[in-house]
Image (cartoon, helix red, strand yellow):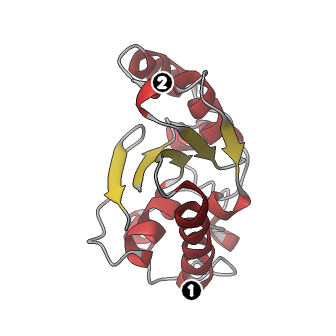
Amino acid sequence: MKLYLLRHAESEYNRIGLLQGRIDCNLSDDGLKQTYEKAKVFDAAKYDICFCSPLKRTLQTAQILAPNLKIICDDRIIERSLGDWEDTPTSDEKKFLLNNIMSTPPNGESTYEITTRVKDFIDFLKENYGDKKVLVVTHAGIIYAVQVALGLEINPINNLEILEVSID
């Protein structure tokens, strides 16, 4: 199976430098513009199906980039809960800790919790879509967790960037 993990475009919280986690905010004006620009060259026809986090920023991204694909929202790929850090300013310390998937924000989701639900999602895809090209529009935290779950090198991912993964 080919899995294409796409991080949503810039959100309102990304723009103003706040951590969002599960806060359900929209794409920023720039995020919308960037997504419409990407849509001009994005070939949604190369994918068989699209799974999406149920949060607005991912759903908006998916609907703009892949309007003709069936889009299925799945709670297993919702962003990591950042607990007490949600709705707080981003800092270098928090960025460092969040980029280290092994750390847990205070009252947030642990690495074990996020990796467990991501593994369940991957197993579901393998069982039901093993011969498909699956587009997954989600969040940086989930893309990091997929890399951990599959034993891949953990690399940061920017807004609207795609990580392609082959799964046997």
- Marks 1 and 2 sit apart, C-alpha to C-alpha, by 32 Å
Tell me the SS state at disc 2: helix
Q: Residue 154 in the image: x percent, y percent?
A: 30, 69
Q: Residue 151 in the image: x percent, y percent?
A: 33, 78
Q: Residue at x 38, y 74 (%)?
A: 150
Q: How many marks?
A: 2
- Quarter of the picture holding the C terminus: bottom left
Which of 71/86 is in front?
71
Residue labelled with disc 2: 35
Badge 2: how crowded within 10 Å, few (<14), some, or many (20+)? many
Is residue 157 among the parts visible in the rendering?
Answer: no
Q: What amino acid is found at the position of numbered circle 1 in the picture?
A: Tyr
Q: Residue 54 in the image: x percent, y percent?
A: 72, 47
Residue 133: numbered disc = none
Q: What amino acid is found at the position of numbered circle 2 in the picture?
A: Thr
Tell me the SS state at disc 1: helix
Q: Residue at x 36, y 41 (%)?
A: 161
Q: Is residue 128 above or below residue 133?
A: below
Q: Is residue 108 above or below residue 23?
A: below
Report which quarter residue 129 is drawn in: bottom right
Which of 16/143 is in front?
143
- Tell me: 36 left or right of 88: left
- Tell me: 127 left or right of 93: right
Q: Residue at x 67, y 34 (%)?
A: 26
Q: Residue 52 in the image: x percent, y percent?
A: 63, 46
Is residue 31 among the parts visible in the rendering?
Answer: yes
Residue labelled with disc 1: 112
